[in-house]
Structures are given as C-alpha cells and as structure tokens.
Image: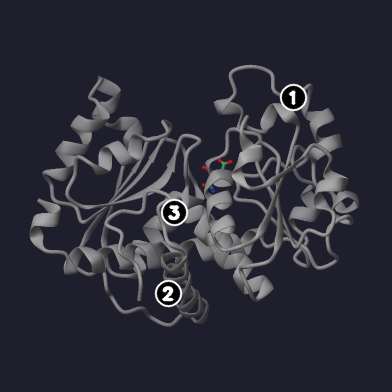
Amino acid sequence: MTFRQKHLLGISGLHPDEIRTILDLADAHADRNRAGTPHEQVLAGLTQVNMFFENSTRTQASFEIAGKRLGANVMNMAMQASSIKKGETLIDTALTLNAMRPDLLVVRHPHSGAVRLLAEKVNCAVLNAGDGRHEHPTQALLDALTIRREKGRLHRLTIAICGDIAHSRVARSNIHLLGKMGNRIRLIGPPTLIPPGAAEWGVEVFDDMAEGLKGADVVMMLRLQKERMDGAFIPSEREYYHRFGLDAEKLAHAKPDAIVMHPGPMNRGVEIDGTLADDINRSVIQEQVEMGVAVRMAAMELLARNRADAPPEVWA
Ligand code: NCD
C-alpha cells in the first residue's frame, strides 16, 4: 500500500500510486456499502470534526456517513453559529478546536489556500472538502472511481469538462487527477469562463460543444458558480443553455457510450437538461454521490493509519 500523506489537501501533491491506493480501498468499501456488509471499525475511538464555512449538501453528509460507518465519533460544527461570526479568525478557531484533540478535521472554506494554512496550525490530519476555486480532492477521487467502475479503466480516455471552469475547484482537482493518470482532457466553455493560462495545463480548449465533445468517453458538466462571479460572465442563462447546456442533441457528438457526470448541485435547464440528468442509461450522477461515501471512508482510513504509524514528534 502506498499512501504517505499526513493530510489530504489537494490532488496536485499526490503520486499516481497514492491515487490508485485510495481508489482500490474505496472500491472495496463501495462494494461493502452496496451489499450492506458491516465495516471494520477502523476509526473507532477517533474524533472527526467537520468544519464547513460554506454551504454543502453532498460533501458534508457523505463525510459524516463515511466517518460513522467506520466507527468515528463525528461532530459537525455549526459554522453559521460559531464565533467566526463574532470576528474570531480562522486560525484562532483552528487552535481552539485543536486543543480539544480531534484526530480528523474536514474543512471547507471559501478562500483558496485557507485549508492548507489551517493544516499548518493543528496536529491532526486535515482533509480539504473544497477551498475557494483551488482544490476539492475527494470530489476528483469520487469522480475517478465512478469513471473507473463505468469504463473499466482510468487511462487513455477522452474526458470533456464543460462550463464554468474558471470558478471551479472541481475542475482543477479533476484536471490534476485525470492528467496524472494519462487521459486526454478537453475544457469546453465560453472564453470568459476559461481561466487565462489554461492552455498551458496540458489540456485542449474549445468554445464549441459539438467540436469539443467529438469522440468523448466522459462528459463532465459544471455548475455556473454565480457566488464566485463578480460581474457578468455570460449574456443570459437562456443563451448559455442554448450554447453550452448539455442535452441529448449535443451529447450525440460524444461516443455512443459516453457517460454524463455532474458534481452537483445541478441547475436543470442552465448547464444540463433535466431529462438527460435523470436518464439512468447515460447519467452516473447518483453513482457519483454513492462513490463519494466510499472515497471519503478510504481517505480517512488511510490518513488515520498514517497518523497511528507516525512517530509522535511528527505531530508535535
Ligand atoms: C461542488 C463544490 O462545492 O465545489 N459541489 C460538490 O462538492 N459536490 C461544485 C459546486 O458547488 O458547483
């Protein structure tokens, strides 16, 4: 087993073997979850604290379920009601929590880099549940597991990531992961939503869905992240849907067996047609959610194992 990390802050610092290790363990957990087989309580006696400074449905719920399935004591901090609202800094909140000796800290924060900063101040394992537009490593891992289970491999696939790339941490983590595993990545979106410099990431960039989807094995749709936009990036949602919204007609340009993915939350009729999103023959959106629990179980298990194996001075 290869996995040497103290924290899971992003995909960019992971070796392909470490990615494979997480996915293999998660795959086994997913089968057990599906069969309803009880899990070994490898997190028993450990305290997991979830700190979400930004809204979340899937990610927070699945981290909680994942921890509980493996026997951890899980606490969800109600950040809306916390002392952050009284002006306490992120670091002071982190130090206060740290004094309570948690073992695993799961953090989502609106600022890129905030989770790493926090990880430097505490002596427990930190998992990044999304920081600004920077990284969302467990999302990329659950996407990878879904693709691997659906396509039977995670290399030499053509994967189109479509929509609001500029504001998306999901896109960034996926580009790192899918690139490391040897796939062909295409970004499709209006030039206003493609970050400057994207052409240097080893990806192909398109502003036309028909062209970009040609021959794709996987079509990954992204939400328009309006909360991160400080101006007008698209003429109108109607116009956006017309040009970039995925429907059966545009999907016909991809391979006949191409799968449709979306990290959620979805805006039906903006970036994706509702009927297509629900089409179980094409859409794997629910499987992504299912794999989310398994991947988070695997990530926390591996970090807890490294923590138990590390000499105490590593965590001092
Ligand atoms: C994403 C996120 O929060 O980055 N959602 C998720 O975690 N499933 C994507 C989004 O908000 O659009």
Q: Which residue is mark 2?
A: 25
The answer to which of marks 2 and 3 sits earlier in the sequence is: 2
Residue 61, numbered circle: 3
195, 256: nearer the viewer: 195
Q: Which residue is mark 1?
A: 234
| Image position, residue 312 (x, y; %) | 9, 60
Closer mark to the observer between disc 2 and disc 3: 2
Residue 88 position (above or below residue 258): above
- Which amino acid, by three-letter code, is at mark 2? Leu
For residue 131, side relative to residue 87 (left or right): right
The answer to which of marks 1 and 3 sits earlier in the sequence is: 3
The answer to which of marks 1 and 2 sits earlier in the sequence is: 2
| Residue in the image at 82% along x and 29% along y | 238
Farthest top residue in view: 231
| Residue in the image at 75% along x and 57% along y | 278
Which colour assignment does the render follow?
one colour
| Residue in the image at 53% along x and 61% along y | 142
How far separated are the C-alphas under marks 2 and 3?
A: 20 Å
Residue 54 position (above or below residue 236): below
| Image position, residue 259 (x, y; %) | 74, 62
How far separated are the C-alphas under marks 1 and 2?
A: 41 Å
Residue 57 position (above or below residue 196): below
- Which amino acid, by three-letter code, is at mark 1? Ile
| Image position, residue 66 (x, y; %) | 39, 63
- Which amino acid, by three-letter code, is at mark 3? Ala
Corner quadrant of residue 143:
bottom right
Q: Is label 2 in a helix, a strand or a loop?
A: helix
